[in-house]
Image (tube, grey):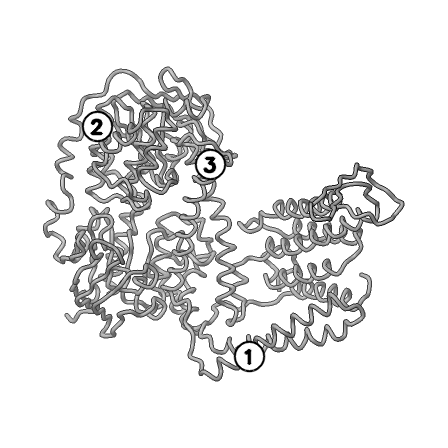
Amino acid sequence: MASLISIKDLTFSYERAESPQLNRVNLEFAPGEFVLVCGPTGSGKSTLLKAINGLAPHFTGGKLRGRITIDNQDVTGRLPHELAELVGYVNQQPEGWFVADTVEDELVYGLEQLGFDRERMANELSRVAKMLGLQDLLDRPLNFLSGGQQQRVAIGAALAAGQQVLLLDEPTSALDLEAAAETVDLLKSLAKDHGVTILVAEHRFNNLLEKVDSVVVVNNDGTVEKGDSHWKFEEDLRPGLHHLDQTSNSGESAGEQIALTTSSLTVKYGDQIAVSNATLNIKAGEIVSLQGANGSGKTSLLWAMQGAGNGSKAVSTGTVSVGEFGDPRDLQPRERLKAITMVPQRAADLLFLTSLSEELSESDRFAEVPPNSTANIFAHLAGKVNPALHPRDLSSGQQLALVLALQLVKGANVLLLDEPTRGLDYVAKKHLASQLRSLKNQGKAILLATHDFEFAAQVADRQLHLVEGVIQ
Amino acid sequence: MSPFSLKASRVQPGSWWLLGISSAVVAGLNVDPIVLLVQIGILVAIILLSREYAPWSQSLKFYLALATFVVAVRVIFRIIFNLTDGSSQIALSLPQLSINLGFGGNVSLLGDVSVPSLVAATTDGLRLAAIIISIGLANTLANPRKLLKSTPAALYEIATAISVAINLAPQLIESLQRVRRASALRGRSKGLGALAGTIVPVLEDTIDKSLSLAASMDSRGFGRRGKLSRTQIISLRLISLTSVVLTSAGVFVLLVGTGRQPLALTLLIAGLICVLVTVRTTSKNSIRTRFKKETWLLQDYVVVSVAIAAVSARVLGWQV
């Protein structure tokens, strides 16, 4: 079959970068092909997608060479809005990508920009609403929709003008298991039944692998390989996944000492109950995972246990106790950090200095510990990293390790983690798993809230499930 | 035909803005503190009666606080940098401080504060306060996204920038709260010292969000336009420049010259015509279409008539 998208000798690099994001890439995609684009975090997988609709280099900076054609039109160097009716693009977080208030307004936004007349807009609107099952949601405000529904609206908006190419950047990473599976099935049917060529960049690709027609791997040096979905994955991109499965619970078994205990912990926002009567015990040297869909109360429970409270609106009742420290909610902030510590969903929120070395030494001063204490923990977790780097230039995995080091240096024995695997690729997740295991061997009690069931299965000694605020 | 309603979403956002701006103009030309107070009262009442739940409609408290602050600053400054006006009505008798500036001049602070000077300061403050609340009314009641849709194509890009900025404000507050909670996790205080730790992540977050929204709009075709010839572009620029000059001159005459309202009005109307010509010509160049037609209802005509009546009455020198 003739190819729809053809990429010839494409090289993309940022000024002063050591290696190009994309290096002499040659790829062909057929109409209706469903493609997974994967590769380590920081490799050029998003860049490859963005180059196809012009967001790279126009929104990202950098320099592009080579040639891209879509449907026999040369689109190299064209602006995103010039390609709007050819290519639809769906960003990582649909909620930040919405431009309207309601589903219908969002779906027609692109059509208005492209100058469709009213009759044609009505036709396209009903076609795309039917295709994505949005007919009953047209009047709904976008922020009342679930994550999966929002994702469907974002896909609909990207295809409303009849685009034949759909690019998605990590469409399932923020979704819970069920919504992620639904999204993958939906994409499959768009490719198979409607002939849309789909490229998905994703590092949570287990449920994608069985559905896609082909796989593109973007390596760290910017080179790219393409193959079918059964090709070379076991050894290359999921190193240690199986290995981890075998060793997951082989660490030292948990001690008998209870490190964290809560009873009848309830969290309310006004009249709304986020967590209801949570009673649990975590032993020293134990890793417990807390799973549940988006909005099931995982984050609220963690913040309540930590004691600083998630904003003034959350009110928690019931008891929490951390060994001899008692209830962290009654402790002064500095005292609290010696008992229990937490890493929030966006670890980078805790970083504010301009270099890694400054963050590390400031942490030593604040914690009143000998110099290099934080640096030693960080080196143990992340290995050798150039201390002059800006914290925001670290990879997500390194940022997480840095925040873990900052939070652990005061010696807390209980560690709470909120969605630690968000934005981590398989290699980084493997590192995180071994980091957590080594902390467990030091006797830390770890509770991690996650919807990444694979990761939970690998590291947790025990799994808890939270459904609408109730531990099952 | 839907019944008459003054709920925020039932009135065109453009009408709310017209009312807000007219009210600001009326307030700016007012010299009577009592009338200003009444005007502020009416504005607050309209906001309370009409507002509905929306992210941009929760800021009345902020505008009231700002207005109070402005009045207080005005009065306090007048008390500190007090000019003796020879009036015998003394409201406050404070010790006078004389400061030698070292080059022959003396500055005197405090001293006897007269009633007329306090009244004048309060009136100045109230005038600014009424202008602030007027703009607050428009901001609280008009849905910025809906406003964007009814903007003429020529102003669409500017209106988009404003609308994105307005939409980002609640997000900015949200990321601010999130980052402050995060810094509490690191054991940092929530005081001023923690400012650096807050600003960097919040700004990063906000810039990311705006860029992401911009990328989204561009990917879906925002920014497309037809082609214009060089002569068209030059003549358009000339007309828009003329409109700016005429309008500024009109406003200047209106504010400075007493008894020259006819001249001011002529200038303003000429300026307005130029603006309309620019907007119309540029709009023809746009390829953007609209899915829903916005219809004007009875409430819109009422709001707009009130706005126009208030401004005309004030400008033509009648007392309302």
The residues tagged by marks 1 and 2 sit, at their Cα atoms, a distance apart of 72 Å
Identity of the amino acid at label 1? Answer: Leu
Q: Residue at x 49, y 45 (%)?
A: B173
Of the two numbered discs 1 and 3 on the same chain, state the one appearing first in sequence. Answer: 3
Give coordinates of residue B124: x percent, y percent: 74, 52
Q: Residue at x 77, y 64 (%)?
A: B314
- Describe residue B45's horizontal placement relative to residue A316 as left or right: right
Q: Which mark is residue B194?
A: 3
Name the residue that disc number 1 marks.
Answer: B238
- Horizontal arrangement in the rendering, residue A112 relative to residue A58 (left or right): right
- Circle 1 chain: B
A348 left or right of B316 in image: left
Q: Chain of mark 3?
A: B
Quadrant where the N terminus of chain A sits is: bottom left
**Quarter of the C terminus of chain A within the rendering:** top left
* 1 and 2 marks on the same chain: no
Q: Residue at 29%, 54% (x, y): give it.
A: A169
Q: Nearer the viewer, mark 1 or mark 2?
A: 1
Label 3 is placed on what type of residue?
Ala
Q: Which residue is mark 2?
A: A438
Dot 3 falls on a residue whose secondary structure is helix
